[in-house]
Image: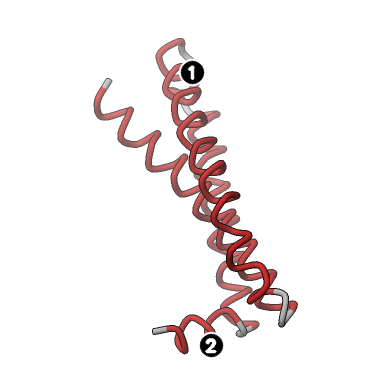
């Protein structure tokens, strides 16, 4: 398992795929912001709550990330993949929180 993660994080192809996934997740979040539901008062509340959830995920991710930093510093591609992976996790949590809150409210 560790070897697979090491191979993925050392790969330039994975870096490009991870970047594309990051742009797609960011685009989905921007779409939610400018959508019909995001313009009214209820939608703004859902967006604010989803952003708060992603802020907590950011706090957790930034506390976990330093434990892997020495391993990631061995290779610059590994470090970039690690940073992009954390960014994608935070965006994914915001998008999922928005979808869940939209169904609940």
Dividing the image into 4 quarters, which one contains the C terminus? top left
Q: In the image, what residue occupies the spot 53% across and 29% down?
A: 33
Q: Is residue 39 left or right of residue 11?
A: left
The relative height of residue 4 versus residue 52 in the rendered view (above or below) is: below
For label 1, the residue is 44
Give how far across and how far down residue 21 sits, in percent. 53, 61
**Looking at this rendering, what residue extends furthest in the top direction?**
41
| Residue at image location 60% in from the left, 49% down from the top | 62
| Residue 95 vs residue 24, the one in the foreground | 95
Q: Secondary structure at mark 1?
A: helix
Above or below, comparing residue 83 to residue 50 in the picture: below
**Residue at image mark 2:** 7
Closest to the observer, 67 or 29? 67
**Which numbered disc flags the more N-terminal residue, 1 or 2?**
2
Point out the image quarter for the N terminus: bottom left
Q: Are marks 1 and 2 in contact (CB under 8 Å)?
A: no
From the top left corner, tell me how far across and down residue 22 is, in percent.
57, 57
Where's residue 28, x and y in %?
50, 44
């Amino acid at each position: 398992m560790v070897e697979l993660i090491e191979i993925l994080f050392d790969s330039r192809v994975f870096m490009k795929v991870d970047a594309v996934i990051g742009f797609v997740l960011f685009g989905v979040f921007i779409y939610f912001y400018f959508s019909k539901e995001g313009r009214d008062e209820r939608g703004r509340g859902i967006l604010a709550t989803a952003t708060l959830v992603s802020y907590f995920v950011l706090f957790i991710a930034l506390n976990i990330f330093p434990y892997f930093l020495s391993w990631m510093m061995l290779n610059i591609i590994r470090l970039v993949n690690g940073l992009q992976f954390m960014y994608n996790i935070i965006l994914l949590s915001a998008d999922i929180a928005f979808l869940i809150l939209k169904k609940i409210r």
